[in-house]
Image: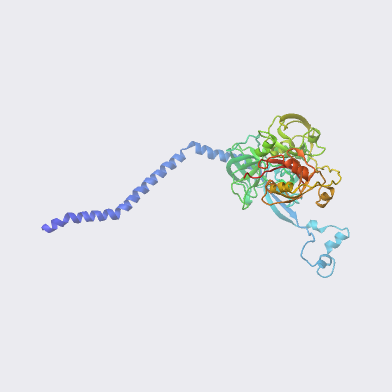
Amino acid sequence: MGRIRWYGPTLVLLVTVLVVMIAGPRLTQNLAHAHKSAEIRLIQQSLENSSSLAQMSEAFRNVAKVVEPSVVHIRISQQFRNSGRNFRNPLEQFFGPYGRPQEDDRQRQEGGEDLQRYNSLRPLGAGSGWVFDDQGHIVTNNHVVTLRDQETVADEIKVKFHDGSERIARVVGRDPKTDIAVLKVDGPVIKASTAGENVEQGDIVFAFGSPLQFQFSMSQGIVSATGRTSIGILRSQGGYENFIQTDAAINPGNSGGPLTNIYGQVIGMNTAIASRTGQFAGIGLAIPIDDVVHVVQQLIERGEVARGFIGIQINDLDPMMAQTFGFKGHGVLVDLPVPGSPAEKAGIQSGDIITGVNGKNYKTAAELRNNVSKYAPGTKLEVEYFRNGKTHTVDVVIAQVPDQMAMSRGQFRDRPEADPSADDFETLRKLGLERVSTMTEGLAARYRLDFREGVLVESVRRGSSAFASGISRSAVITSVMGKSVRSVQELVDEIKKHDLTKPIRVRVMQGNSGGFRLLQLPKE
């Protein structure tokens, strides 16, 4: 009996330990699960009772209800045409597969009916748009309604509204330089509400449209930045860029759709994305509403856009370049006034730094160009500029942008070139100008350039100061720190007046474009 009493408490303890070891973890898990469930229920109740969240969700729904009736889905189609560039036997193209002239070709040759107009339409693409006014004008991107060449309008443009109805639209006007087009449909429409240009970084915005064929979609984000003027998507058209950047999801098919604020007012038009894959990557671009309205109203009224032009080639002014002019502050550098232009007639010269137009200051060339273009031809502008340490003001009456800017061509005789010393040539070679010649009419003809006095660059060393600054073969150097140079010797003489380890400003003509470049050797 004593032995049983001795081991009894030990057995009880062992059993208890085993029970705890087996049941303890599960009990702990159950307690933790119960605690997490209770926490989730409390949070869920908090969310359900949050009036601010409910108000935000309701506000977003209301934006959709306000905007969607004015948003349209656009589809373009093109009639199939036999261009004659197929892969049939060349004889079959004329005689047919059995040696007989094909009927439609023969009829066209004989002045008969062109049967290709009966061919079916092929769908080519789709995009978005929005109703601009009560007259049925619809705004979209030019690239939405044109073919790949951006010049030919599609044969059929069909517009689908949010209620499912479809109508055929006609083109009222297009402006490739801003990628804006205006269409017109018949019948009742609900126009969009637009806002004045008061967009700031951080504003909540909504993008509407038909991304990737998902019609009448809505995405939300913020304004990432404003005033994106150097994207380059309209460079080939000589276009005018000024974009709102947003992280609201924009994909192919959103083009032409409205970008709105929290009140459902259009603040821009979705136009492009920055992406390495072709799909949304967090950077969408929209044309500001003020720019859209400025163009659309002119397209509706006259079918084209008239832009102001003062006639200067300009460039951004970086601090190092400004230092060579003895200038501090913000401005835009005049590379070249166009001969016969309003700017040249008003006395503006190469090397002037424009600091203001009508009292408004500009930091970039694109910003100045875009703003001047909005003035109607005949408008008098007060232009403020810096020259030789002083600020000047002059009135410039702007003209309309010409289709082609004719550059004047000098008429000079060939001059015998001076014979610079070996040391002189070594100075130029240090800067990267490996081979240069005094410009002559013979050289101009050989390089297919307009003749102008200066020094022709025939070879530039890769990796040199000249190469890094953008000077290339066939460029013509016309001045050094504002002093004209007409020969290699004059170029050397002017350069040797300055410390090569400090920026030396040279003016360079490349084709019909002029600009300033900086030459500088590293300090030893």
Q: Position of residue 62 (x, y in %)?
A: 58, 39
In which quadrant of the rendered image does the C terminus lie? top right
Up/down of 97 relative to 133, above or below: below
Residue 300 seen in the current view: no
Where residue 188 appears, as percent x and y from the top left, is 70, 41
The residue nearer to you, when weighing 239 against 484, is: 484
Identify the residue at image location x=73%, y=35%: 352
Say if residue 451 shows up in the picture.
yes
* Residue at 79% from the left image edge and 57% from the top image edge: 118
Q: Is residue 364 above or below residue 462?
A: above
**Percent of width and height locating residue 455:** 78, 46
Judge whether 450 appears above or below 199 on screen. below
Q: Residue furthest right?
A: 110
Count of marks, rendered view: 0
- Seen in the image, is 69 located left or right of residue 120? left
The one of 517 and 48 positioned closer to us in this rendering: 517
**Whole-percent x, y for residue 5 in the image:** 13, 56
Q: Quadrant of residue 376?
A: top right
The residue positioned farthest toward the bottom in the image shown? 98
